[in-house]
Amino acid sequence: MLLAGWATPRAAASVSCTAALGAPALAEGPLKTAGMEPATADLAVVPGHTYLIQVDERDNDALVEILDSKNRVTARADHPERRTGTRRAVVTAADPPSLVVRVTGKEHAGASGTATVRVFDLAGLGTRPDCIAIVKALAAADSDYAAGEEISSGHSASPARSDARAAFLRAAEGYAAAVSALTAPADRPLRGETALALAGVEYFDLQDWAKAAEWAKTAAETLGTDDPYRRSRADALVAAAWIEIGSTASAERPVPGYGVHSTGLLARARRLLQGLSRFHLQRGERYDAGLELTNIALTYLYEGRYPQCVTASQSASQLFGAIHETLRRALTWQNEALCLWGLGRLPEALRRFDRARKDIPEQPYPKLYLLVVNNTALANYAVGRFDTSLRLFDRALAFAQEVQAQRDEGQSLYGIGVSYYALGDRGRAREFLERSLAIRTAALDGRGRMATLRALATIDAEQGRVENAIAFDREALSLAVAPSAAARIKIQLAAHTAAAGRLTEARAQLDEVISTRAKADSLIRAEALLQRAALLRQMSRPREALADLAAARPPLHRLGGVLEEFEADLEQARALRMIGRPRAALAAVEGALGHSDAVRLQSANPELRAQLQAPLRPAYDLELELLRERYERAIAAGRDKEADAIAAAAFVSADASRAQSLGDVAAQKYSPAVRRALASEFQRREALYRELAARQFALDARVDRSGSDDPHARHLMSDIAELERQADAVNTVIASRAMFAGTARREGSARASLPSLPADTALVSYWLGSESAYAWVVLPRAIHWTRLPSPVTVADQAVAFHHSLTRLVDVPLERRLHDAQVLYEMIIRPIEPWLSGARQWVVIPDGALDYIPFAALAMPDPKADSFVATRHDVALAPAAWMLDTSGARVRSRARRALLLVADPVYQPDDPRLAVVMRTSATSQPPARHSLDPDRGRYQRLPFTAQEAAQISAQFPPADVDRLIGLDATRDRLLSLDWSAYRFIHIATHGIVDAQVPQLSALILSSYDSSGRVVDGAVRVADLSLESLAADVAVLSACDTALGKQVPSEGLLGIGSTMLARGARAVVASLWPVSDEIGARLMTEFYRHLLRDSMSPAAALGAAMRSVVSSGAADPALWAAYQVSVVALGPGPPARGVASRGPATATRP
């Protein structure tokens, strides 16, 4: 808006617009305003006349609305000067000539104020078009400000098409134009008031601190001594803007334009605020005095002077409490919590945050609400309550986006990112942190940008991009103001400098931190000492490292988190090992592992817990290395019994690290009451996973065409990360309600004993560590422990073998056989003497060995019976502690024998669908592509019906429930009580998501029995809600044994979930199965299982031998299936039902 061209008549040049406006034509008030209750004034006006309606408010911030005779809002006015100031609206009276002025408070119920309404007929300004233009500019600015407030409070009727910032920018332009035009000396008060309004827009809404300080200073100078109260408000805004500028400026150099460093500018702001506080107290204005004390506390907070911050916050709290200003008092509690946090008193801080959050609602000040929710979430993150932090950040993010609070949105995204980092999900952490960094510019939120840069630097360093990490560290350091923040960044910079190989430089950086700032802060000093200890150990100076650890561990125990204690204990163990004190090192690492439950239980969500387990792996590695050294000394000395005891202790320790997330899934109980309570969460989760699958399909297609740097692909990645975050939040709610007496480590996983085994069974447990690879062989009366070739060598060969098995067409048989023999020599030959006498092998794989069909390993023997499968039956187990070898796991007493799902309908040209459509009123199935965009690639599996017939023929017909063809739908399957079946056989397509295991799915029919398109995906999330009592569940689909690989947890997906939810054994596949041989394997499997009463492992082994003996020597054809068990024992009792002989059907 340009007012410079307004014409000002010469005769009126010396007359102010305020004077020219004259006395009001009408006046009402003062009206009483209470809380958010509206007060009204009815005005009788002249039709066709244009009026300025001016409302002066006091003590209750308010919105002004003008209503016509039909009660329609014709104008709105609001103003940046809260609890005081004048709202203006210009309206032209219609016929009938009546207007209603409605004044609605915007504060809490206890706020009580007044509003005085004055009405000016603008006809009196007929000779002063310049004044009319000024009046209209002020009214238009107030209208734009009201629009911006409506959008930013979440009250806009169409928020998606509204832009709060644009409205605030228009308001700022209007106020600035009016300031420029108000040149008459007598208009000086109005000019000062308008400059103050402009400063308010810049500070509160546009968050341009430099402009806010400039306009507030102009307002203070213009108002002078004529309006001391309003001048104090202007000075307070100057100080507030200085605080923001000082808190985001570098501590290393003077703040541009101010001639002092950041701490100097903060001190200047504090002195100004202290004077203003005294001024208001002398006048009895306790509310304003409390505001100044609140900001004084912030100056101390940003300087790291936490005790003074606490004192100032408490003084402000007392003032607000005395006048029943609950919202402002809650804000002082929030600030006090931040100060207590700085002092390391996190439990107290959390209590203050929670107390504040209860008293700060979303309205009338959304940004205060977002501030306290984000900070409470961050405090919960700091103490390891990641479920709570993610839930609160999720709430804040949604609300920040709704009210267009960009700065708060950046904070929420940052919080989500660091929470995922702590949970071990680096990919999703980076996604949210990069989104946060894009918002958090140095001008908008320098402190926030500093924090986000630090987090991204940590991820870059872990992923080998060390120089990028150092660059991020240096930028973060340039934004640090508080000495404590700068010290922590320097500690991180030193760690990354060491990772870059510059150990001496890193040492100097840490020495500087310890000798300066860290002297005054025991926690920062401890963190620096811990980092220096790790560096000294790398520099082969372990004794100096131990000295640093001795000084660091007490304050870390007192003030730090569980992860810091864990890292300190682990670092001490490493240093003690270097100086030749293995017993002390072992005690230290056992102390570190004593924190394992505390680390894992930072989330109730099993999927997130699985990721929390990963940081514990190095401690288990070190414990095993120390035990191995003791074992070898005992063997060398001939102390065999001692060696066996050590081997058993090592086995139990390794086993305790395994399958914890499966135990968590198994511990979940879904009673009818819990299912009813969680019904909405189940529905939301289903919708989220459906949407996730659609986005993932679109992303895969886009990346294939345009690569991962394509803008649309990047947008899809962002969408996927957001949907995954929402799914995590829902899963956490579900898991929290369903967890059953198993939130701590289950008794079985902590038992210090070996499993008892049947006479013909050997238990083989593998460990691929960072230093060494090991195998234990547990026999009924003995245990053996041996070292294998290097873990890298074993892993590489395992990957090569799995690759050759999955490439039947382009990798020759000879290559597969060679790989099978090489891997046999690595992982079986060293333990072969102890295994040869055991018919059944129960294998606990680790790392890359999760992908290996042990039955297909082969001795270097040209004979056909050289495969393991020809001589032994092989079963896998997730962990020995989960394995029932005593019969305590009661055999199924299910009411039904078999649930059989096979041969779904996938394509619209399937003849079975055509039959339905001819008899249905619907002429053509409706298209719902959003259900499963990948549906078009699924082709019919016609031979699964024949396979199903062969299997069901081995059971009494009345004991079999069949879901075949159009009956094989997701809804039909999930409507059944799975615990009613002894055997479950599902022969369909399957998909595996190695990144998001909950998206792995069995793909059932795309059409139901009436011909409608339906969602056919039965996802892991669905399986996790089922309770099974089956002796065996067979997943005759591609890749159902695969999933997301998590250290010590194995492959998390379809098969593992079925096992966790109650199946005694699960048969699943490691790669796509040849249909003809797959059908034969399954028929043979059931024949041996039922007729011969074999165990699942023995039945599968017999089926494999049958195929191999028929001449199919290629393991790619017959070795895909494996059986995983949690119970050992004989097979099901024989049935008096004759088999119909070997199957001859084939599957495409």
Image (cartoon, grey):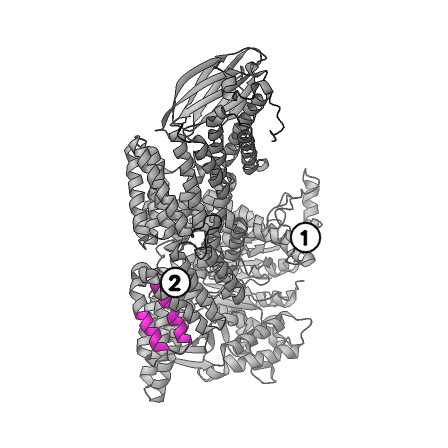
Residue 439 appears in view: yes
Q: Tell me which residue sits at (43%, 65%) in the image.
A: 615
Residue indicated by mark 2: 889
Residue furthest bottom in the image? 637
Instruction: Please tell me whether mark 1 sits on a helix, a strand or a loop.
Output: helix
Q: Is residue 458 above or below residue 103?
A: below
**Image quarter (top left, top right, bottom left or bottom right) of the N terminus:** top right
Asked whether 1 or 100 is in front, the reply is: 1
Residue 537: say if magenta. Answer: yes
- Find out whether the residues at labels 1 and 2 contact each other: C-beta distance under 8 Å: no
Disc count in the image? 2
Asked whether 998 or 941 is in front, the reply is: 998
Instruction: Please tell me whether mark 2 sits on a helix, a strand or a loop.
Output: loop
Kindly indicate the quadrant of the structure image that contains residue 576: bottom left
The label on residue 327 is none
Q: Is residue 977 above or below residue 1078?
A: above
Q: From the image, state whether disc 1 or disc 2 is nearer to you.
A: 1
Q: Tell me which residue sits at (30%, 30%) in the image.
A: 284
**Image quarter (top left, top right, bottom left or bottom right) of the C terminus:** bottom right
What x and y, as percent, mark residue 392?
Answer: 43, 46
Lateral position of residue 379 relative to residue 968, left or right: left
Residue 44: say if magenta. Answer: no
Asked whether 951 or 112 is in front, the reply is: 112
Name the amino acid type tagged 2. Answer: Arg
Name the amino acid type tagged 1. Answer: Gly
What x and y, as percent, mark residue 491?
Answer: 41, 64
Residue indicated by mark 1: 936
Q: Which residues are magenta?
A: 524-550
